[in-house]
Amino acid sequence: MKYQLIIIGGGVAGITAAVYASRKKIKTAVITSNFLGQTGRAGLIENYPGEIAIDGEELAKRFENHLKSLPIDIFENQEVNSVVKKDDVFKITGKDQLFSDTVIVATGRNPRPIRVKGEDDFLGKGVFYSAPKDTSSFKNKTVAIIGGGDVGFKTALQLKDECQKIYILEISPHIRAEEVSVDKAKETENIEIINEVRLKEIKGEENVSSIVCVKYNKEEVFSVDAIFIEVGSDPASSFVGNLVDFNEKGEIIVDSYTGETKTKGLFAAGDVTNSRDKQITVACGEGVRALISVYNYL
């Protein structure tokens, strides 16, 4: 099937582009593996205009509902394996094979594993890569959060009323999270922040029971019921191959004015790009920018 535009990715950047594409009456399809994206895994969001505070999953659901109200074809629960261009037409291959005059890549990022012993063995059995949606299942539990960035602290604050004890373990000497989150964590009795510590091993039988960490070349064992690994993410960009240039982080390099890649007609938006700021509102704006560029291109 042939479209004027195919948007790859169902996060906030891709859906915002789709909303504007519908208003411009561009024949559009959206291909996505899910509608959560970084937003849906973010826990409580307090910096999205128009909402004093909103759960990330709820916000992602609102975006999804908006998309599904539009006259746009949606290919859900699908991964894209490759994008190629021939004779000014893009061929997008996944479960289905689709064709389009233009493409917007808005696939965001995937959680980054830390590749320590036991990590794969206990995935889903006490090892998690995102904040829990149901915090009640961690009532009176002890958990460790690996990573002292914004997401790590938000996860800790989300769990503070349920957990008996929360460790925030950061490998560097400095905490990278927003000061407001750090201050709240420091004021919370059951949260302990430990710097300059590295996770070495995850242990347990059926489920996680402890972790081995190294601080100043000395090993220390923490008894924990669960671990949330929040050490960042990697761009989901490999499927576009040689149609784009990547920076050293694997992010797609785009023109800062148009959102276009080195391939004419191929645009990118949101966290998958080399944009400096990874924020929901920035991703929305980049989705609009890419769509307007697509409209002008067409």
Image (cartoon, helix red, strand yellow):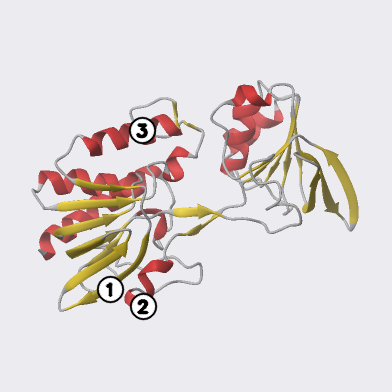
Amino acid type of the residue tagged 1 in the rendering? Val
* SS label for mark 1: strand
Query: Left of 55 or right of it: where is 175?
Result: right
Mark toward the viewer: 1 or 2: 1
Amino acid type of the residue tagged 3 in the rendering? Lys
Image position, residue 226 (x, y; %): 71, 37
* Circle nearer the N terminus (1, 2): 1
* SS label for mark 3: helix
Disc 1, disc 2: CB below 8 Å?
no
Label 2 vs label 3: CA separation? Answer: 33 Å
Image position, residue 174 (x, y; %): 70, 50
Query: Left of 42 or right of it: where is 10?
Result: left
Q: Which mark is residue 61?
A: 3
Viewer-side residue, 290 vs 137: 137
Mark toward the viewer: 1 or 3: 1
In the rendered image, the residue lying farthest to the right is 218
